[in-house]
Amino acid sequence: MSQTHLLTGAGSGIGLAVARRLADRGDRLILVARDDARAAELTALFAGSSAVVADLRQPQTIAALAADLPDTLDSVIHAAGVVDLGHVADLPLGAWESQLTVNLIAPAELTRIALRALRATRGHVLFVNSGAGLTAHAEWAAYAASKHGLKALADALRGEEAPHGVRVTTVYPGRTATPMQARVHEQEGNAYDPARFIDPESVATAILTAIDLPADAVITDLSVRPGPR
Protein backbone atom coordinates (compact mmCIF):
# COMPACT_ATOMS: atom_id res chain seq x y z
CA MET A 1 0.00 0.00 0.00
CA SER A 2 1.39 3.40 -0.96
CA GLN A 3 2.10 5.95 1.72
CA THR A 4 2.11 9.75 1.91
CA HIS A 5 5.22 11.61 2.98
CA LEU A 6 5.91 15.28 3.67
CA LEU A 7 9.54 16.13 2.88
CA THR A 8 11.89 19.07 3.16
CA GLY A 9 15.18 19.27 1.30
CA ALA A 10 14.02 17.09 -1.59
CA GLY A 11 15.89 19.14 -4.15
CA SER A 12 19.42 17.95 -3.40
CA GLY A 13 21.66 15.61 -1.44
CA ILE A 14 20.13 13.17 1.01
CA GLY A 15 16.63 14.59 0.62
CA LEU A 16 16.77 14.10 -3.15
CA ALA A 17 17.92 10.49 -2.76
CA VAL A 18 15.10 9.74 -0.30
CA ALA A 19 12.47 11.42 -2.46
CA ARG A 20 13.55 9.44 -5.52
CA ARG A 21 13.39 6.15 -3.66
CA LEU A 22 9.94 6.88 -2.27
CA ALA A 23 8.63 8.08 -5.64
CA ASP A 24 10.06 5.05 -7.42
CA ARG A 25 8.12 2.71 -5.19
CA GLY A 26 4.87 4.58 -5.82
CA ASP A 27 4.49 6.60 -2.63
CA ARG A 28 2.89 10.03 -2.65
CA LEU A 29 5.25 12.96 -2.01
CA ILE A 30 4.32 16.37 -0.64
CA LEU A 31 7.40 18.54 -1.06
CA VAL A 32 8.09 21.72 0.88
CA ALA A 33 9.42 24.42 -1.46
CA ARG A 34 10.69 27.89 -0.62
CA ASP A 35 8.71 29.61 -3.41
CA ASP A 36 6.43 28.91 -6.37
CA ALA A 37 9.32 28.58 -8.83
CA ARG A 38 11.02 25.97 -6.69
CA ALA A 39 7.70 24.17 -6.22
CA ALA A 40 7.36 23.90 -10.00
CA GLU A 41 10.90 22.52 -10.31
CA LEU A 42 10.31 19.87 -7.65
CA THR A 43 6.97 18.65 -8.94
CA ALA A 44 8.47 18.39 -12.42
CA LEU A 45 11.25 16.27 -10.96
CA PHE A 46 8.88 13.84 -9.25
CA ALA A 47 5.89 12.90 -11.37
CA GLY A 48 2.69 12.73 -9.35
CA SER A 49 4.09 14.72 -6.45
CA SER A 50 2.64 17.92 -5.05
CA ALA A 51 4.29 20.86 -3.36
CA VAL A 52 3.49 23.30 -0.59
CA VAL A 53 5.25 26.64 -0.34
CA ALA A 54 6.98 27.83 2.83
CA ASP A 55 10.35 29.46 3.36
CA LEU A 56 12.16 27.59 6.13
CA ARG A 57 14.20 30.75 6.70
CA GLN A 58 10.95 32.37 7.80
CA PRO A 59 9.20 29.84 10.07
CA GLN A 60 6.23 32.16 10.50
CA THR A 61 5.24 31.18 6.94
CA ILE A 62 4.94 27.50 7.85
CA ALA A 63 1.66 27.61 9.79
CA ALA A 64 -0.20 28.54 6.60
CA LEU A 65 0.65 25.09 5.21
CA ALA A 66 -1.81 23.45 7.59
CA ALA A 67 -4.71 24.12 5.22
CA ASP A 68 -2.81 22.45 2.36
CA LEU A 69 -1.91 19.23 4.15
CA PRO A 70 -3.98 16.04 3.85
CA ASP A 71 -5.85 14.60 6.80
CA THR A 72 -3.34 11.76 7.07
CA LEU A 73 0.44 11.57 6.72
CA ASP A 74 2.57 8.47 7.08
CA SER A 75 5.77 10.41 7.66
CA VAL A 76 7.42 13.78 7.86
CA ILE A 77 11.06 13.67 6.78
CA HIS A 78 13.19 16.67 7.66
CA ALA A 79 16.18 16.68 5.29
CA ALA A 80 16.73 20.40 4.67
CA GLY A 81 19.62 22.19 6.33
CA VAL A 82 22.19 24.95 6.03
CA VAL A 83 25.76 25.25 7.29
CA ASP A 84 28.16 28.13 7.91
CA LEU A 85 31.45 27.41 9.63
CA GLY A 86 33.54 29.80 11.66
CA HIS A 87 35.11 30.49 15.01
CA VAL A 88 32.79 31.74 17.73
CA ALA A 89 34.95 34.86 17.88
CA ASP A 90 34.22 35.61 14.23
CA LEU A 91 30.74 34.27 13.43
CA PRO A 92 28.27 37.07 12.71
CA LEU A 93 24.87 37.03 14.34
CA GLY A 94 23.25 36.20 11.01
CA ALA A 95 25.13 32.89 10.79
CA TRP A 96 23.72 31.85 14.14
CA GLU A 97 20.22 33.00 13.28
CA SER A 98 20.06 31.30 9.89
CA GLN A 99 21.32 27.93 11.11
CA LEU A 100 19.18 27.82 14.22
CA THR A 101 16.16 28.91 12.20
CA VAL A 102 16.43 26.50 9.27
CA ASN A 103 17.95 23.54 11.15
CA LEU A 104 15.89 23.66 14.34
CA ILE A 105 13.03 26.14 14.56
CA ALA A 106 11.55 25.36 11.14
CA PRO A 107 11.51 21.57 11.75
CA ALA A 108 9.83 22.15 15.10
CA GLU A 109 7.12 24.30 13.54
CA LEU A 110 6.56 22.00 10.56
CA THR A 111 6.28 19.02 12.89
CA ARG A 112 3.78 20.89 15.04
CA ILE A 113 1.39 21.56 12.20
CA ALA A 114 1.75 18.02 10.83
CA LEU A 115 1.07 16.19 14.08
CA ARG A 116 -2.69 15.94 13.64
CA ALA A 117 -2.22 14.12 10.33
CA LEU A 118 0.57 11.94 11.76
CA ARG A 119 -1.48 10.94 14.79
CA ALA A 120 -4.29 9.82 12.48
CA THR A 121 -2.02 7.15 10.97
CA ARG A 122 0.30 6.54 13.94
CA GLY A 123 2.94 7.90 11.59
CA HIS A 124 6.63 8.71 11.74
CA VAL A 125 8.78 11.81 12.15
CA LEU A 126 12.33 11.43 10.88
CA PHE A 127 15.02 14.05 11.42
CA VAL A 128 18.15 13.99 9.28
CA ASN A 129 20.63 15.27 11.83
CA SER A 130 24.45 15.06 11.58
CA GLY A 131 27.45 13.72 13.39
CA ALA A 132 27.70 17.34 14.56
CA GLY A 133 24.49 16.74 16.48
CA LEU A 134 26.45 14.46 18.79
CA THR A 135 29.91 16.08 18.90
CA ALA A 136 30.92 19.68 18.28
CA HIS A 137 34.32 20.50 16.83
CA ALA A 138 36.15 23.79 16.40
CA GLU A 139 34.53 26.10 13.85
CA TRP A 140 31.29 24.11 13.94
CA ALA A 141 29.70 25.85 16.95
CA ALA A 142 26.60 27.33 15.31
CA TYR A 143 25.81 24.34 13.11
CA ALA A 144 26.45 21.86 15.92
CA ALA A 145 24.31 23.89 18.30
CA SER A 146 21.42 23.75 15.84
CA LYS A 147 21.85 20.00 15.42
CA HIS A 148 22.25 19.34 19.17
CA GLY A 149 18.99 21.24 19.53
CA LEU A 150 17.40 19.08 16.84
CA LYS A 151 18.35 15.98 18.84
CA ALA A 152 16.69 17.50 21.90
CA LEU A 153 13.57 18.24 19.87
CA ALA A 154 13.42 14.64 18.65
CA ASP A 155 13.98 13.16 22.11
CA ALA A 156 11.28 15.32 23.70
CA LEU A 157 8.86 14.71 20.83
CA ARG A 158 9.36 10.95 21.09
CA GLY A 159 8.19 10.96 24.69
CA GLU A 160 5.30 13.31 24.03
CA GLU A 161 3.93 11.51 20.99
CA ALA A 162 4.36 7.89 22.11
CA PRO A 163 0.81 7.87 23.56
CA HIS A 164 -0.45 8.84 20.09
CA GLY A 165 1.53 6.07 18.38
CA VAL A 166 3.80 8.47 16.50
CA ARG A 167 7.36 7.18 16.11
CA VAL A 168 10.36 9.50 16.05
CA THR A 169 13.76 8.71 14.55
CA THR A 170 16.96 10.70 14.27
CA VAL A 171 19.55 9.71 11.66
CA TYR A 172 23.08 11.05 12.15
CA PRO A 173 25.01 10.83 8.86
CA GLY A 174 28.73 11.36 8.82
CA ARG A 175 30.24 13.32 5.98
CA THR A 176 28.15 12.60 2.89
CA ALA A 177 28.83 13.48 -0.76
CA THR A 178 26.28 16.27 -1.16
CA PRO A 179 26.30 19.90 -2.30
CA MET A 180 26.40 20.84 1.39
CA GLN A 181 29.60 18.85 1.79
CA ALA A 182 31.10 20.65 -1.18
CA ARG A 183 30.22 23.95 0.51
CA VAL A 184 31.83 22.77 3.77
CA HIS A 185 35.04 21.97 1.93
CA GLU A 186 34.97 25.36 0.27
CA GLN A 187 34.62 27.01 3.67
CA GLU A 188 37.40 24.84 5.08
CA GLY A 189 39.64 25.66 2.14
CA ASN A 190 40.06 21.99 1.22
CA ALA A 191 39.81 20.16 -2.09
CA TYR A 192 36.59 18.17 -2.37
CA ASP A 193 36.62 14.54 -3.50
CA PRO A 194 33.11 13.06 -3.20
CA ALA A 195 34.50 9.52 -3.50
CA ARG A 196 35.90 9.87 0.02
CA PHE A 197 32.48 10.24 1.60
CA ILE A 198 29.18 8.41 2.08
CA ASP A 199 26.96 8.14 -0.98
CA PRO A 200 23.59 9.84 -0.31
CA GLU A 201 21.91 6.64 -1.49
CA SER A 202 23.42 4.81 1.46
CA VAL A 203 21.92 7.30 3.89
CA ALA A 204 18.60 7.01 2.03
CA THR A 205 18.70 3.26 2.61
CA ALA A 206 19.13 3.85 6.34
CA ILE A 207 16.23 6.31 6.36
CA LEU A 208 13.90 3.96 4.50
CA THR A 209 14.88 1.14 6.85
CA ALA A 210 13.76 3.27 9.77
CA ILE A 211 10.42 4.37 8.33
CA ASP A 212 9.63 0.90 6.94
CA LEU A 213 10.24 -0.87 10.25
CA PRO A 214 7.08 -2.64 11.47
CA ALA A 215 5.00 -0.62 13.90
CA ASP A 216 5.93 -2.77 16.90
CA ALA A 217 9.44 -1.26 16.92
CA VAL A 218 11.21 2.05 16.36
CA ILE A 219 14.79 2.97 15.53
CA THR A 220 15.26 5.95 17.81
CA ASP A 221 18.82 6.97 16.81
CA LEU A 222 20.91 5.74 13.91
CA SER A 223 24.46 6.83 13.12
CA VAL A 224 25.77 6.30 9.60
CA ARG A 225 29.53 6.62 9.14
CA PRO A 226 31.84 6.32 6.12
CA GLY A 227 33.00 2.77 5.54
CA PRO A 228 36.59 1.67 5.01
CA ARG A 229 38.24 3.12 1.93
Image (cartoon, rainbow, N blue to C red):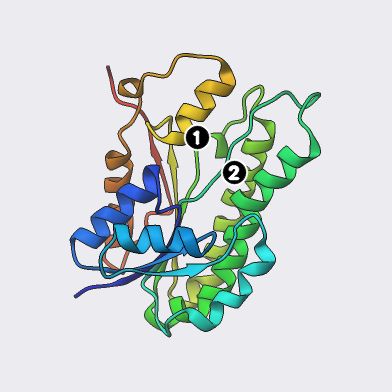
Q: What's the distance in space between the residues labelled 1 and 2, CA to CA? A: 9 Å
- Residue type at mark 2: give it: Lys
Circle 1 sits in a helix, a strand or a loop, which is it? helix
| Image: 108 above or below 91 | below
Q: Residues within 10 Å of mark 2 (few under 14, many from 20)?
A: many
* Left or right of 32 on screen, residue 95: right
**Residue 171 at x, y = what percent?**
43, 46
Q: Residue furthest top?
A: 190
Q: Which residue is drawn at the image coordinates 51% and 74% (left, top)?
A: 114
Q: Which residue is drawn at the image coordinates 59% and 71% (left, top)?
A: 112
Q: Tell me if residue 168 can be seen.
A: no
**Residue 194 at x, y = what percent?**
35, 24
Which of the 4 image quadrants contains residue 25?
Answer: bottom left
**Residue 186 at x, y = what percent?**
53, 22
| Image: 5 above or below 137 | below
Q: Tell me if residue 211 can be seen.
A: yes
* Mark drawn on residue 118: none
Q: Nearer the viewer, residue 69 or 46?
A: 46
- Residue type at mark 1: give it: Gly
| Image: 59 above or below 190 | below
Q: Residues within 10 Å of mark 1 (few under 14, many from 20)?
A: some
Which of the 4 image quadrants contains residue 23?
Answer: bottom left
Circle 2 sits in a helix, a strand or a loop, which is it? helix
Q: Residue furthest front?
A: 37
Can you identify the residue that label 1 sits on? 131
Can you identify the residue that label 2 sits on? 147
Quadrant the N terminus occupies: bottom left
**Residue 179 at x, y = what percent?**
44, 35
